[in-house]
Amino acid sequence: MATNKLTQGTTGSTDIKMRPVSVDDHIIGNPNADLIIVEYSDPECPFCKVFHSTMRRVMDEYGKDGKVAWVYRHFPIDSLHPKARKEAEALECANELGGPSKFWQYTNLLYDTTTSNNSLDPAQLPIMAKAVGLDVSAFNTCLSSGKYAAKVQADYEDAIAAGGKGTPNSIIVSKDGTKTPVQGAQPYENLKGIIDALLK
């Protein structure tokens, strides 16, 4: 189900069915940015690992001046990566215990740590929680409770509704509501080209 096809939508559409971006989303950058890139990602997908670095670079270039914001949503592909769903819940626990800054620190560390394809030892999850300064006991309680399973599933269903067939699957939302799909782990230069065209 993971894909790395070099195809992307260059034409915008308003009929992609996806949940509107809201305060409940994990967003980095200006929520009123000209473009919001909504990424549906699986933390055990090797292409998502590569694209995570690409998105960090995009935010370094376009996030500082408020042109682009990044929204992270969960899209665990259970058939390929059965561990990914619990990892997605771990991201939510990091957010609960430390807010948005710890969510992004934990997410970055998880993508930096995993070697992908269901390889991450679940015992690493609390170790990473400690590394980013979270209360490990509270983190373990949160993770074992399964309290965020429904939220992860809701993101998954939103990804499918938005046309997601593989990971990563991203949709660039312009201020006028136009949505431009970006399939797979596009190289930075490709993504930059799409962003620059949409910002014109």
Image (cartoon, helix red, strand yellow):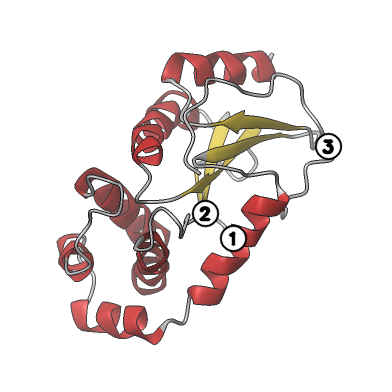
Rate crowding at label 2 as few (under 14), some (14 to 19) or many (20 or more) other CA atoms within 10 Å: many
* Residue shown at the point (69%, 44%) measured from the top left: 163
Alpha carbon distance from label 2 to label 1: 7 Å
Pointers 3 and 2 in contact (CB under 8 A)? no
Q: Is residue 140 left or right of residue 4?
A: left
Q: Which mark is residue 75?
A: 2
Of all residues, the one furthest to the front in this rendering is 79
Of tags 3 and 2, the one toward the viewer is 2
Q: Which residue is mark 1?
A: 155
**If the image is split into quadrants, where does the C terminus sit?**
top right
Quarter assignment of residue 91: bottom left
Mark 2 vs 1, N-terminal side: 2
* Residue shown at the point (66%, 32%) measured from the top left: 181
Pointers 2 and 1 in contact (CB under 8 A)? yes
Instruction: Identify the amino acid type marked 3.
Output: Thr
Q: Is residue 149 left or right of residue 160?
A: left
Mark 1 vs 3, N-terminal side: 3
Alpha carbon distance from label 3 to label 2: 22 Å
Instruction: Identify the amino acid type marked 1.
Output: Asp
Q: Which residue is mark 3?
A: 14
